[in-house]
Structures are given as C-alpha cells and as structure tokens.
C-alpha cells in the first residue's frame, strides 16, 4: 500500500513506520513537513524516501497552504496518509479530500486531552493512567473515529519528559500495527465509526500497560 507521512518534528514515529514498513505492508512514498528543521526530514532522506518541506509562510492562509500540500501529496497517489506529529490543524477541504484515508496518532487516551500539552495536563489532573490513541481524521480536532489505544501507568515520580518517553515507546508499536490493519484491508471507517474485521468498533482496541502490542 502506498503511504505518505506528515510530520513537524523529530519523526520518531516516522522512524518506526519506516523500520516496520515491510511487516506493515506500507510503502512510504514521501514525507512532508511544515517545518524546515524537522529532524524527521533527515530520517526520511537517510531512508531514501523523498522528503519535502512546504513553507506555510509562503501562502496567504490555511486554505492556500493546504491546497498546495494536497496537490504535492496527490502526486504520490497515496492510499493512506499518516499524521505523525504533524502539528497543524488541517482545513475541512483537505480532510474531506482524503476522508477515510487519514490516520493520526495523539498522545492521550482520547477523548481525554484533545489538543496540546497532554502530558502536562495529565500530571496536573493527577491521572493514574495515560497513553496514546490512533484515530481516523475528521474535521473535528482529535475527534475522529477511535481505532486503538495503548495505556501506561502514571508513576509518582513522573514528569513530562519521562511520561512522554514512555508514551512514545507505546506509540512506536501501536502505529505500525494499526497501519498493518489498514494495509491488509482489515480496517476501514464508515458511518462515523472505525470498522475492524467487518465489525464496528463501539470502543477502541485497548492495550493495557503490560500488554504486548502485536
Ligand atoms: C508524538 O508523541 C505524537 O503523539 C504527538 O507528537 C509527537 C511526535 O513525535 N502528536 C501530537 O501531539 C498531535 N496532536 P515524533 O515527531 O517523534 O514522532
């Protein structure tokens, strides 16, 4: 399956998708970033994947930028678009163009903590559990149909750095797994929910703290 990945930063999730692309049956055709300095672009080049920076500063507004990004992505004819730490809100027109074919990974147990600074907010709230979620993207921010989540326990000594590191360890396993479900046609979305193996998911597939993700 042809995939395109969108990033804004370090690209550790991109790296895990590159490293597992054979098992997950997704061939990453290109990587796009809205940040020139995103280290993920370097990771893509090292893996011989075309790496593109599209500069938001060159466009009058969100719609114009998204239209340009959409055109450049379309040239690769992706069947799946993966947001992997892409930190821009996408316009409804962009999301609708790729509807049913965009996934996002988010560092919280959605619907808790949509948006930014999830690790800090978990610590401030005194939550005992945290984790990451993968969902289909709709034009509602972090609100599309949930597919899978991986949980971690929050420890008394945790700070944002340690929490984020443990959440990311789980992300790097969960994203390739969910991608493999999509690439093998086990996963789709319609009627506002995710469907896995022909069944609608009334709740996401959840991997508990000590459960192996495979
Ligand atoms: C990941 O933890 C991802 O969940 C988060 O950004 C990080 C990117 O790390 N995404 C969001 O916050 C999206 N709202 P990476 O660049 O090392 O993959």
Image (tube, rainbow, N blue to C red):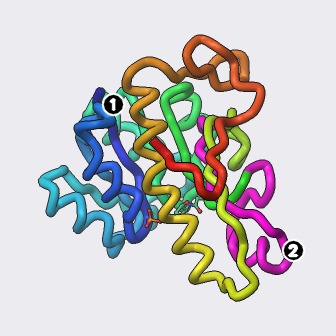
Which quadrant is the N terminus positioned in? top left
Above/below status of 150 relative to 157: above
Residue occupying image coordinates x 41% and y 39%: 70
User: In the image, which residues are magenta?
Assistant: 110-138
Most extreme residue toward the right is 125
Residue 210 visible? The answer is: yes
Mark 1 vs ligand 1: CB below 8 Å: no
Residue occupying image coordinates x 78% and y 71%: 122
Measured from the top left, where is residue 67 in percent x and y? 45, 41
Residue 138 visible? The answer is: no
Measured from the top left, where is residue 177 in percent x and y? 44, 39
- Residue that numbered label 1 is attached to: 78
**Which label sits on residue 125?**
2
Measured from the top left, where is residue 121 in percent x and y? 78, 74
Q: Quadrant of residue 206?
A: top right
Left or right relative to 70: residue 151: right
The residue tagged with tag 1: helix, strand or loop? loop
Residue occupying image coordinates x 53% and y 37%: 94
């Amino acid at each position: 399956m042809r995939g395109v990945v969108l990033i804004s930063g370090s690209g550790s999730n991109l790296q895990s998708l590159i490293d597992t692309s054979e098992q997950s049956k997704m061939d990453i055709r290109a990587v796009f970033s809205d940040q020139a300095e995103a280290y993920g672009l370097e990771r893509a080049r090292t893996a011989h994947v075309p790496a593109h920076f599209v500069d938001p500063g060159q466009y009058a507004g969100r719609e114009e930028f998204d239209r340009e990004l959409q055109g450049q992505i379309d040239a690769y004819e992706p069947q799946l678009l993966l947001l992997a730490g892409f930190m821009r809100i996408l316009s409804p027109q962009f999301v609708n163009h790729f509807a049913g074919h965009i996934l996002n990974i988010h560092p919280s147990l959605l619907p808790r903590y949509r948006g930014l600074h999830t690790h800090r907010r978990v610590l401030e709230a005194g939550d005992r559990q945290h984790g990451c979620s993968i969902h289909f993207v709709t034009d509602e921010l972090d609100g599309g149909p949930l597919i899978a989540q991986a949980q971690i326990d929050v420890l008394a000594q945790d700070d944002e750095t340690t929490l984020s590191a443990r959440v990311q360890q789980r992300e790097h396993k969960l994203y390739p797994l969910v991608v493999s479900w999509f690439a093998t046609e086990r996963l789709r979305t319609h009627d506002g929910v995710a469907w896995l193996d022909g069944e609608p998911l009334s709740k996401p597939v959840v991997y508990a703290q000590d459960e192996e993700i495979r």
